[in-house]
Amino acid sequence: MPLESRSLNNSFAHEVIGLRLWERQDDQVIDELRALWAYHPVLVFRRQALSEHELADFSALFGPLERTVRTDWASPVRPEVGIISNLKDAQARPIGGLGDGEIQWHSDQSYMLYPATGAMLYALELPSAGGSTSWVDLCAAYAGLPDRLKRAVDGRRGVFSYAKRLSGYQGVDRVISEEAKRKTPPILHPLVHTHPITGKRALYLDSTTTIGVEGMDQASGADLLEEIYEWATRPKFVYRHDWQVGDALLWDNGFTMHRREPFDPSARRLMKRTTIFLSREWHIVPEGNLVAA
Ligand code: SIN
């Protein structure tokens, strides 16, 4: 039977109906999900009940899983699963990362030379208010740019810096290991890519990580980026997800950014995330270069 799905709030996000992600999926289902995902960069699966292994195994149907540089957020049960939470253990140490604050528009892994651009986030405990996550469709955003801005970004590369991203984090999330520092030098990624399936052009952006544009002086690069972010994040390109326990969202960071609203620090929020190396055959996967010394 063909996969059943429907648009959410008339947006680019699609809810996939009737799949139990903890069960074995046949090849036809995976192919249909891949095809749907090319056009709808956020796929929502509701009412899931997943162990860490089930979450990781389902995610791995789309590509090898990445163990991100945030080894301090990794689950002790299945290290490819990251814990996104404000909860603390009995010694008052965070059990994961990203706490309870606002997180600005970003694309996971944009600071990596070879980013693992697939991601899945699964909700286990939620605050009664706040903590919604929004995604912006950067294909639609590119199409909506005035020609003047398309010309300004076409063929340009942005400079992406993990140091900038870290400076926006709270508390211990700002601290990384020497190995993580070594793996995250400033890098360049093209600001525009073409999707291999849809043929559409898309912006590749991350407002928490970009520090400039190659070949432009600091002020002009910053002005261009600011203007692009202002255009790209207009409400008509955005889907906002109000989480329910059991929601699992699969998204493609190759042509989206996402942001999270803050929530009451005394409320509990527990999410689990995977990060997936997607294939260039099906997805936009930026290929980075080191910034010349
Ligand atoms: C993230 O930005 O990866 C986490 C989003 C969230 O906590 O909703």
Image (cartoon, rainbow, N blue to C red):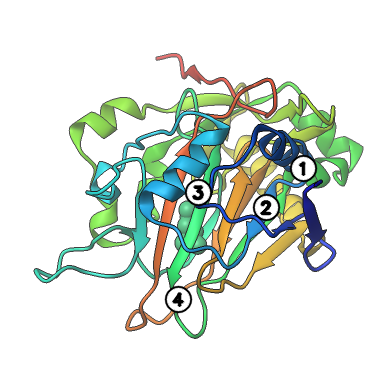
Does residue 212 sit above or below 121 in this rendering? above
Q: Which residue is mark 2?
A: 43
Residue 109 visible, this orientation: no
Left or right, 196 with respect to 177, comes to right
Residue 36: image x %, image y %? Answer: 77, 42
Disc 1 to disc 3, C-alpha distance: 29 Å
Mark 2 and mark 3 lie on one chain; the one further toward the N terminus is 2
Left or right, 16 with respect to 89, comes to right
Task: Label 1: state its secondary structure.
Answer: helix
Task: Label 3: state its secondary structure.
Answer: loop
Residue 168: image x %, image y %? Answer: 40, 55
Q: Which residue is mark 1?
A: 36
Q: Quadrant of the C terminus?
A: top left
Mark 4 and mark 1 lie on one chain; the one further toward the N terminus is 1
Task: Label 2: state its secondary structure.
Answer: strand
Q: Is mark 3 within 8 Å of ligand 1?
A: no
Residue count near mark 4 (Cα–Cα under 10 Å), binned few <14, some 14–19, many ≥20? some
Disc 4 to disc 3, C-alpha distance: 24 Å
Q: Are marks 1 and 2 in contact (CB under 8 Å)?
A: yes
